[in-house]
Amino acid sequence: MLETSVRLLKLLSLLQARREWSGAELAERLEVTTRTVRNDMERLRILGYQVHSTTGTAGGYRLGAGAQLPPLLLDDEEAVAVAVALSTSASGTVEGLEETSVRALAKLESMLPSRLRRRLSSLQAATVSVARRGPGVDAAALTGIAAAVRDHETLRFDYLNQDGAPTVRAAEPHRLVYTGRRWYLAAWDTDRKDWRTFRVDRMRLRTPNGPRFTPREPPEGDAAAYVMRGVSSRARSHQARIRLHVSLAVASERLPPEAGMLEAIDETSCLFITGADDIHDLASFLGSLGFGFSVIEPAALADHLRVLADRFRVAATPSETLDA
């Protein structure tokens, strides 16, 4: 009986590790006959696992989704990865997930072998999060939007515009995009007949969803790029186009996604499209990058940089010793 139980756990681990297995492959891994594999599959079904099987030369076994979440069997690396992800999400921007993540993390840590608890503790002790927090987003809203994206169902929702005015909108959702501070939805606005970007924290979903739709190709084929292009320039008093004197790869490592859009110019330079409400803040940010750049536009930014350059030049020039 003990041998059978151990074999069932091994079988369950194999089924969770890969989408589909043939009976012969499982028999070889478990060092049993294919008949024993069939019997073990029946035992898993009795225990409540949804095991699907197909016959023929291409037949095999696949673990399906059941009515309840079955126990998950994780290897060492998977367990540590899940624990780190839960620890990170416990301080995230999705409202309601913090407490849930803490509870799940506590359950997982209590099950970890001591060697893995030491690894996780060392990683947590050596890590300090400086993630920028954005507006909280309702977890139910995210899952509702994601389901509509998956099922190609039109969303109906109340939306607060930038000036705080409420509107009722209908849109075909395409992708959720997280910039590191905020969640956005790229969608086709059915009333305005154009693509729009919506901040999820300003959305209040209505039920039920609208009719199903045929997905459209997003602008330039990239929903994330479309959202970031709009986020980097929308509602900013000063729009800017900057030539950075580094490769696209180097700039991408240095600049956070929400800072603006990056486009390659050649192997040694790239275009940075950004904006700011204060020209001085924008100039200070560019000066802090640590590599060369040239202002393409606006002229006001170039003028402000010249003023700063003169000010710094004077500050760096030795002055006469002040009288005591």
Image (spheres, rainbow, N blue to C red):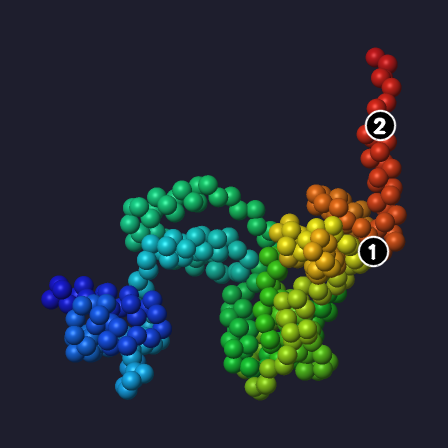
Q: Position of residue 215 (x, y in %)?
A: 60, 82
Residue 317 badge? 2
10 Å crowding of disc 1: few (<14), some (14-19), many (20+)? some
According to the picture, the residue beneath numbered tag 1 turns out to be 296
Query: 268 or 60, which is in the foreground?
Result: 268
Determine contact: label 1, label 2, CB under 8 Å.
no
Tell me where residue 71 sits by quadrant. bottom left
Q: Earlier in the sequence, mark 1 or mark 2?
A: 1
Q: Quadrant of the N terminus?
A: bottom left
- Work out whether residue 258 can be spotted: yes
> Which residue is outermost to the left?
1
Q: Is residue 282 left or right of residue 319?
A: left
What's the CA distance linking mark 1 and mark 2? 29 Å
| Residue in the picture at 73% in, 54% down | 269
> Which residue is outermost to the front?
267
Query: 251 or 28, which is in the foreground?
Result: 28
10 Å crowding of disc 2: few (<14), some (14-19), many (20+)? few
Tell me where residue 172 sits by quadrant. bottom right
Q: Is residue 253 left or right of residue 15?
A: right
